[in-house]
Every structure is written in C-alpha cells, then in structure tokens.
Image (cartoon, rainbow, N blue to C red):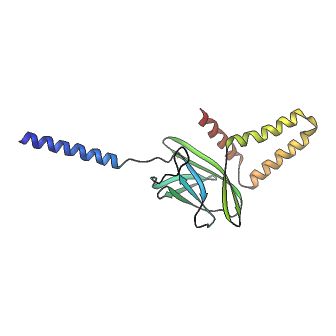
Amino acid sequence: MKFLLYIVAISIYFLGSFSITFASKKYALNNFIVKENLIKNGKLAIIACDSTEKPTDNINGTFSFIINGFRQPLSFREGVAISPLEIERSSFVFLKHENEQGTHSKLYYVYKNDDGLKPFKINWIVLLIIPIIIILIASIYKRLIFFAVLALAALAYFNYNKGLSFDGIFETVLHGIKDIF
C-alpha cells in the first residue's frame, strides 16, 4: 500500500512539473512588421509576427529595440507594441531587435500625409541595386558621369535628410546578406 502511494505521489509530481513546464513556454520575437497605430496619433505600431509575416498574439512582455539608433524598451501586449516616438514628417525608420536567435532588423520609409502614416518596407536589395545601376550607366556612357555623380549626391542627400544614415544602409544590407547564408 505504501509502495502504491509512493508511485502515485511521484507520478503526480512529474505530471505537475510537466504541466508547469508546458505552461511556461516562452515565445521569442523573431519577426515583426510596422503599421500605423490604430488611434492615428502619429505613432507606429510594431506587430509581432511569424516567419510568413502573419501577426501573432502570443508575445507579451518588454523587448529592447533600437529605433533609428536610440534604444527603446517596447512593451508588447498580445503581440502589439506602440513606439513612444511620434513621427512628425515623412522619414526613414530603422528598427533592430536582438535576442538569442540573432539580430532582426528592418528598414521602413514612413510616408506622412493628412490621412496618417503609411509605412513602406524597404528591401536591402533596393539599397544595393539603385547605386550600382547608376554607377554602371555612368561607366558605360562616359558623358553621363556628371549626371551620375549628381544623382548619387541627390540620393545621399535625400536619404540623410529623411533620417537614414550610412550606418543604417550598411547594417540593413549586411543583415540581408547574412539572412541569405
């Protein structure tokens, strides 16, 4: 009888620890998208999602992000966090999050108009292709070197004026290349 009671006690202990371990499963933030906040107050909503960019609501807690070079703790509730920074004009927004699985970063151009904010994700390939095409055209047609230099300077000024630094460009391209391998 004592032996049977002992086996029941051990099995309850193991079943209890299994359910506690199962209930305390932690979810990692490995992908996110950016949308306009629903109350249209000029702030961005960072939404946790899976690898197919489908929003997920099982992310809760505070996660550290770097937004345009400034470290911001973002509090996620049901997979959504609101950026504390208000967007006053159209600009680039570079978001980076580091966790145990690696560094996850994305670059967005946020267009602001009377209707609100419209974030557009910028792929790292575009950041490489546009200057390479301008340089190739200038090298093929020697008469266009002046216009190519002017176009590259205008592109650099536009990027800098809208909040995109060269560090942000290089970091986005490097993370994109790392994701390939």
**Residue 38 figure quarter:** bottom right
Q: Position of residue 77 (x, y in %)?
A: 47, 59
| Image height of 92 relative to 89, above or below | above
Answer with left or right where residue 2 lies relative to residue 36: left
Residue 56, image x, y percentages: 49, 51
What residue is rendered at 76% in x and 55% in y? 161
Residue nearest the viewer, comparing 66 with 75: 75
Q: Which residue is drawn at 68% across and 42% down?
A: 124
Res 91 → quadrant: bottom right
Q: Quadrant of the N terminus?
A: top left
Residue reaching furthest right?
A: 143
Q: Position of residue 128 (x, y in %)?
A: 73, 39
Which of 111 and 98 lies nearest the eye of the viewer?
Answer: 111
**Residue at the image point whose x is 68% and y is 64% from the top:** 88
Residue positioned 53% across, 41% down in the render:
102
Q: Nearer the viewer, residue 163 or 77?
A: 77
Q: Residue 162 vs residue 64: left or right?
A: right
